[in-house]
Amino acid sequence: MYRVAVYGTLRMGELNHRLLESSQYIGMRNLDGFLMRSLGNFPTLVEGDGQVTVEVYEVDEETFILLDRLEGFPRLYQRKEVVIDGFPAWIYYWKYAESAAGYPLVECGDWVRYQDSRRPRAVY
C-alpha cells in the first residue's frame, strides 16, 4: 500500500477522482513547501515557499501505477515523498518548474476553492 497526497483533479468531486473511489480516504491536510499554479483545466505544484491543500489516500499498487500514468510520471511530473502527520506520502509535482512561473499562481493553495471562485454565479 502507498499513501498519496492529491491536490487537483484527483480530489473528491473533480474529474479524475474516479481513480481513487476504491481507495481509503485518510483526510484533508495542508502541506508546506509547494506553490500551486493553474495550467488552465488542472493545477500543478512546484517546490516553493507556500502551502497547498491536499487529500490523502491509501492506494494499492494497481492504483499507484494508474496515478503514475495519469500524471505522466516521470516524463511530465516528478514524485516526491513528503511527511504528513508523521507518515510518508507521495505527491506529484511539475518537472519543469521554470516553465510554470508564467502560469497564474493559485494563491489560496486550494484547487477546489480556486475553481469555485472562478465559476459563474447564477443571478436571480
Image (cartoon, grey):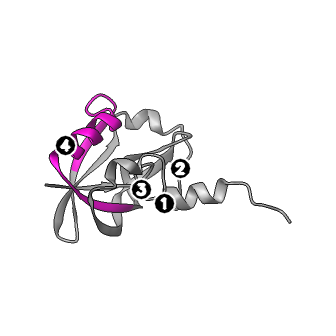
Query: Which stretch appears magenta?
Result: 54-80
Pair 1/4: label in front:
4
Frontmost of labels 2 and 3 is: 3
Q: Earlier in the sequence, mark 2 or mark 1?
A: 2
Instruction: Quadrant for the N terminus, please.
Output: bottom left
The kind of secondary structure element at disc 4 is helix
Q: x%, y% of residue 34?
A: 37, 54
Label 3 with label 4: CB-CB less than 8 Å:
no
**In what element is the residue under mark 2?**
loop
Examine the image and state in which quarter residue 124 appears.
Answer: bottom right
Judging by the rendered image, the residue that carries numbered circle 2 is: 105
Q: Which mark is residue 16?
A: none
Which amino acid, mark 1?
A: Asp
Foreground: disc 3 or disc 4? 4
Residue 122 included in the magenta stretch of the image: no
First in sequence, mark 3 or 4: give its number. 3
Q: Amino acid at mark 2?
A: Leu
